[in-house]
Image (cartoon, grey):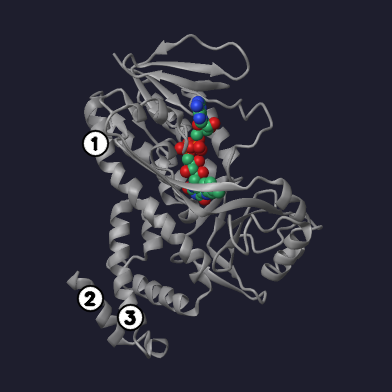
Amino acid sequence: MKKNITIIGAGLVGSLLSIYLSKRGYKVKVFERRGDMRMEKMSAGRSINLALSDRGLLALDKVGLSEEIKQIAIPMHGRQIHNLDGATTFQPYGKEGQYINSVSRSTLNMKLMDLAEEHGVEIHFNEKLKKIDWAKDAMEFENTNGKSLPSFKTDLIFGADGAFSAARLQHQLQHDKFDYSQYYIDCGYKELTIPATASGDFAMEVNALHIWPRKDYMLIALPNLDKTFTCTLFFPFEGEASFSNLITEEKVKEFFQKTFPDALPLMPDYVNEFFNNPTSSLVTVKCFPWIRDSTFALIGDAAHAIVPFFGQGMNCGFEDCRILDELIEQNGDDWHTILQQYQTLRKPDGDAIADLAVNNFTEMREKTADPKFLLQKKIEARLHEKYPDKWIPAYSQVTFSPHIRYSEALQRGQQQEAIMQEVMAIKSIEENWQSEEIERMILERLERR
Ligand SMILES: Cc1cc2nc3c(=O)[nH]c(=O)nc-3n(C[C@H](O)[C@H](O)[C@H](O)COP(=O)(O)OP(=O)(O)OC[C@H]3O[C@@H](n4cnc5c(N)ncnc54)[C@H](O)[C@@H]3O)c2cc1C
């Protein structure tokens, strides 16, 4: 008989997982602490919009949703960099035709829930996981609206309840030899808005992810279908320019005028939003093991929360679901093997994307404005164009190559970076970057590794 499966959390990953499992014939129940966002007007939590790229799309494609989601997504073909003097430059993300997609978190989550229910998944809202009796595989929930369910048993539990997972706390953390680390970076974030213009248009180039890189911090903006942009200020908690220091209206105005002069006229409500929108922290969570026998597994942010600078957290969680589904295909109902292989395959990839994401913060806030870095990217793009199988820029491996594992992308990216450091140290590189000699040197180094 097929197992009864319970998923904790109807966020992006829990909802997609429930579709995959129900399509395989399992009876799936999902328990979500919040109310039904399709009925109540509520925020879907962090970040209003997200960058969906090829890994996420591939996972959505397997449940027949990718085309529908593309209809409600805005393609972003590259980074539009805003310098301090107001000048802008456009840096394509990949080759012609490659782009990432800005999607609304809540619309995507609601579509996933609709499809889950169409496949027979039961989603129970306002049910907050309180306790797991892991010796009996029994769970207790607290109904945030009133009457709680009696404790009940299930065959297999998936913890898809995010970075601060109660399932992880109630189950894995209770066991001996469970490794767990959480690491907060010294920057937090705050969301601000660029509304549509008076004539109802986008206030800036729509098909780009906008970045105002300012070394220790940065502002970014992603477009929304209603012609607004959601901006995110990634900013230190402490120091001269920091959340703890910008505490008066005058200070905020002075800082924004000095730092983001071209963005300011587009953000009429920024002072109000700065003081009223929440300041949130950014955490990396690594843990091991993710599974327990054939009865419990962590997935998505509950297994591997990462900082958002590669735009991969959701994409990685969606990839977890796709890989798990492939393992079900290969192993039938042998959940012992499925979960073992899931962990063996995905743990190194979760660790790798966590590290790549932290590194990308430096790239986005510091390097995107540096002419030497831009030249490096040009050289890499040219190599990729000429030798598409030999040289794939790290960003493209992560974002546009869903069949390259994150762990492989990290390793190959490090090798390529070491070669590029040598190349960029050549004195005449600005003049000679297109020469055969440089190309030969790069290819030789590549062969040697
Ligand atoms: C500022 C920011 C920007 C980001 N941008 C991107 C991006 O551009 N691209 C990208 O791919 N990723 C991005 N991410 C990462 C992405 O948001 C996460 O990786 C993704 O939301 C993970 O989905 P999840 O379902 O695992 O967890 P969550 O989205 O956190 O969902 C967990 C669900 O579990 C529920 N829950 C929690 N506790 C309980 C409980 N005790 N009982 C029952 N239910 C519970 C929650 O209410 C929630 O619905 C960003 C993250 C941040 C913070």
For the residue labelled by badge 1, is the local secondary structure a helix, a strand or a loop?
Answer: helix
Q: CA distance from mark 1 to mark 2?
A: 35 Å
Instruction: Name the residue tied to disc 2.
Output: 445
Occupied quadrant, residue 90:
bottom right
- Residue 416 as seen in the image, left or right of residue 233: left
Going from N to C along the chain, the mark reached first, 2 or 3, is 3
Task: Please name the residue shown 55% across and 55% down the image.
Answer: 75
What is the total number of numbered labels drawn onto the structure image?
3
The residue type indicated by label 3 comes to Val
Q: Nearer the viewer, residue 192 or 76?
A: 192
Where residue 241 appears, as percent x and y from the top left, is 63, 63
Q: Residues within 10 Å of mark 2 (few under 14, many from 20)?
A: some
Task: Decide: is 17 above or below 53.
Answer: above
Instruction: Name the residue tied to disc 3.
Output: 423
For the residue labelled by badge 2, is the local secondary structure a helix, a strand or a loop?
Answer: helix
Q: CA distance from mark 3 to mark 1?
A: 40 Å
